[in-house]
Image (cartoon, rainbow, N blue to C red):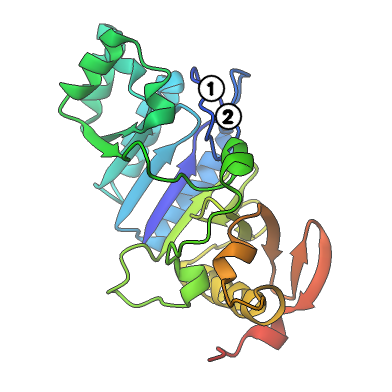
C-alpha cells in the first residue's frame, strides 16, 4: 500500500493541467492532520509514503519534520516536486539531507514553466524524472478538464477494474487531504473513503472495503452508456463521492446505502 499526504495546495508554478488547481495562495497541512496521518501510518504499515502538493518543498521545515517522523514506520518516502528547489543551494542541501526519493515531472505543462537554468538543473539532478511525451494526453481533471474532457482510453485503476491483487501495480494507494479526507489516489474520482479526524482508526482493510463499495456502486448506478465506454462517462468528469459506514454520498447528498453494495458484483 502507498499512503500519500498532501502537504499543501500552494505552488510557485501555475501549470495548465494541475489536478488540484494549485495556486500561489498560502496553504499548509495542519498539525492535527499530521498527527492523525502518522497514526494511520503506524497502524497501516504502508510500503511507501508520498509527500505531495502543490509544491511541498515550499514548506521545507514541515517536510523535514514529517520525514523524520515517518522513517521509523516506513523508510520508502518519495517527494513529488516541480524541481525549483534545485536553484537554491541552501534548500537543495536540506532536501539532499532528507535521504528520500525525489520525483520531478517532465511534461509539456511543467516545461512551459522552466527557465533554461532550471531545465539544466533538473536534467542533471539525478532525481527520478517522470516524463510524458509531448503528444501524450494528460488526466482530464482540474485545470486540464476543459482541454481533455473527451478522453476515452482506459487507464486501468483499481476503482474501475475492481482488482486488488498484488499483480496490479497501481492498487492500494490512498491520500490524506488537507481537510483530513482519505481519498483514492486518483486524479479523476474524488472519492473520500474516510476522514482521519472523524474516525479513530483508518485501516487499510477499511479503505479497501469502502473502495470496493464505491466500485460496486459506480459499476451498477453510474457507469452505463451504449458503447460501454465507462471511462468516457466516469473519468472525464470530476466527481465528489464520500463513503461512510452507512451511506454513499455525492456532493453531500445520500445516493445509496452501503449495505446494498458490499457484495462484490461480477
Give the number of the mark in front: 1 or 2.
Answer: 1
Residue at the disc numbered 2: 22
Image quarter of residue 213: bottom right
> Taking 43 as reference, is 212 left or right?
right
On the image, the x and y values in percent for residue 28 come to 56, 27
Image quarter of residue 255: bottom right
Q: Residue at x 38, y 44 (%)?
A: 136
Indicate which disc residue 108 carries: none
Q: Is residue 100 visible?
A: no
Residue at the disc numbered 1: 14
**Do the numbered discs 1 and 2 sit on residues whose CB atoms are within 8 Å?**
yes
On the image, the x and y values in percent for residue 205 come to 48, 73
Distance CA(mark 1)–CA(mark 2) = 7 Å
Q: Nearer the viewer, residue 92 or 87?
A: 87
> Taking 5 as reference, is 99 left or right?
left
Q: Residue at x 59, y 18 (%)?
A: 24
* 7 vs 183: above or below: above
Q: Secondary structure at mark 2?
A: loop
Q: Label 1: how many residues lie within 10 Å, few (<14), some (14-19) or many (20+)?
A: some
* 138 vs 186: above or below: above
Q: Residue at x 36, y 33 (%)?
A: 107
Amino acid at each position: 500500500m502507498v499512503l500519500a499526504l498532501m502537504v499543501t495546495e500552494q505552488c510557485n508554478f501555475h501549470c495548465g493541467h494541475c489536478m488540484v488547481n494549485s495556486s500561489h495562495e498560502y496553504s499548509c497541512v495542519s498539525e492535527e492532520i499530521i498527527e492523525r496521518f502518522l497514526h494511520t501510518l503506524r497502524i497501516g504499515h504502508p510500503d511507501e509514503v508520498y509527500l505531495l502538493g502543490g509544491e511541498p518543498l515550499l514548506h521545507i521545515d514541515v517536510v523535514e519534520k514529517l520525514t523524520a517522523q515517518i522513517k521509523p514506520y516506513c523508510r520508502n518516502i518519495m517527494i513529488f516536486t516541480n524541481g525549483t528547489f534545485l536553484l537554491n543551494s541552501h534548500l537543495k542541501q536540506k532536501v539532499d539531507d532528507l535521504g528520500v526519493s525525489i520525483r520531478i515531472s517532465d511534461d509539456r505543462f511543467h516545461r512551459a514553466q522552466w527557465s533554461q537554468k532550471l531545465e539544466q538543473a533538473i536534467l542533471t539532478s539525478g532525481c527520478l524524472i517522470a516524463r510524458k511525451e509531448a503528444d501524450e494526453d494528460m488526466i482530464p481533471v482540474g485545470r486540464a478538464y476543459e482541454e481533455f474532457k473527451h478522453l476515452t482510453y482506459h487507464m486501468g485503476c483499481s476503482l474501475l477494474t475492481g482488482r486488488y491483487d498484488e499483480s496490479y501495480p497501481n492498487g492500494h494507494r490512498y491520500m490524506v487531504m488537507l481537510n483530513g479526507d482519505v481519498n483514492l489516489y486518483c486524479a479523476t474520482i474524488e472519492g473520500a473513503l474516510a476522514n482521519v479526524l472523524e474516525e479513530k482508526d483508518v485501516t487499510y482493510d477499511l479503505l479497501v472495503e469502502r473502495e470496493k463499495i464505491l466500485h460496486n456502486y459506480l459499476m451498477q448506478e453510474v457507469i452505463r452508456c451504449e458503447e460501454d465506454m465507462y471511462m468516457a462517462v466516469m473519468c472525464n468528469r470530476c466527481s465528489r463521492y464520500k463513503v461512510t459506514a452507512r451511506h454513499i454520498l455525492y456532493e453531500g447528498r445520500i445516493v445509496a446505502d452501503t449495505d446494498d453494495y458490499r457484495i462484490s458484483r461480477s
